[in-house]
Amino acid sequence: MSDTLIRDWDAHLAHEKRRSEHTRRAYIATAERFCAFLSQHRGGGPDVKMLKSLTPNDLRAYLADRRAEGLGNASAARELSALRGFLRFVGGSGASVPQMRGPRVKKGLPRPVSPAEALQLAQDVEDNAREGWVGARDFALLLLLYGAGLRIGEALSLTGAALPLGDTLRVTGKRNKTRIVPILPAVASAVLRYVEACPWPIVKDTPLFLGARGGPLQPGVVRASVRSARRALGLPERTTPHALRHSFATHLLAGGADLRSLQELLGHASLASTQVYTAVDAAHLLDIYRSAHPRA
């Protein structure tokens, strides 16, 4: 029974959630380990009835077992997030999933959100949304912040006139300054999926990102969803929607982008505003040096 449920979940992740192959492999491996653990822990092969009857104690027992195998806090938090998604899928609409706080992750020096963390954050926000189209909306929005370096206000000010997204997007930032930012195919695909799922019509003069009742989406709603997801994943408090923009800038700089180009992409009025990212990147490189150099 559990093999069938896991295969169905894999298909759901691929076709409904459009998760990458890498993410699906990680999620499926977690579900397989969990079901194998339950066979011993509960004394029988997991089925729908058993999975619906699980309690927070069952999840704690599984994580304790994994921790005994050497699993770290950050990885344990990611496994817990994957398990919540699996149990929500098994339980169907309105399913009650056992709630428990994720493991605490040790705070370090401020660093950019990694690409894997940015994607995991967006996925967890989507998975925990009360409605499918709301999850698709939030996933698309967070990918846009990270993939194009937008401020949350800039993203929420976009209208249906931006559709369909092409290779670039014209954005109006502070002081009504406009700029052109590149759009990754994955971002365009996520926005298209949201638009197709949205129950409200998105036309030229309406906001692109709509709230649950069809009005403009408020930034506080997005921040609350991100706050909940970062706690579930054990990510530090610095992981905010705006942090995704900072990560966009830092990763571009680390990849070889020059400051002038970065200034244009971010919409900074002065180069001095952009130069802060050189310090962030230097701190990140110093972390790498200290962990890798034999005499550090």
Image (cartoon, helix red, strand yellow):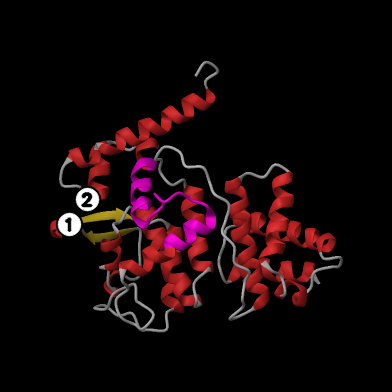
Give left or right: position of 72 versus 123.
right
Can see residue 124? Answer: yes
Give left or right: position of 7 versus 81.
right
For disc 2, the marked residue is 267
Q: Amino acid at mark 2?
A: Gly
Please tell me which residue is depicted at 59% across the width and 53% down the height of the picture.
77
Please tell me which residue is depicted at 35% across the width and 65% down the height of the picture.
165
Q: SS class of the residue under badge 1?
A: helix
Answer with mark 1 or mark 2, whichever residue precedes in sequence.
1
Q: Amino acid at mark 1?
A: Lys
Residue 230 position, x and y percent, is 47, 56
Give left or right: position of 145 versus 99.
left
For disc 1, the marked residue is 174
Badge 2 crowding class, 10 Å Cα cut-off, few under 14, some 14 to 19, many 20 or more, is many
Please tell me which residue is depicted at 27% across the width and 43% down the height of the picture.
262
- Please give the range of residues in magenta: 226-251
Q: Is residue 23 above or below residue 136?
A: above
Residue 1 position, x and y percent, is 81, 72
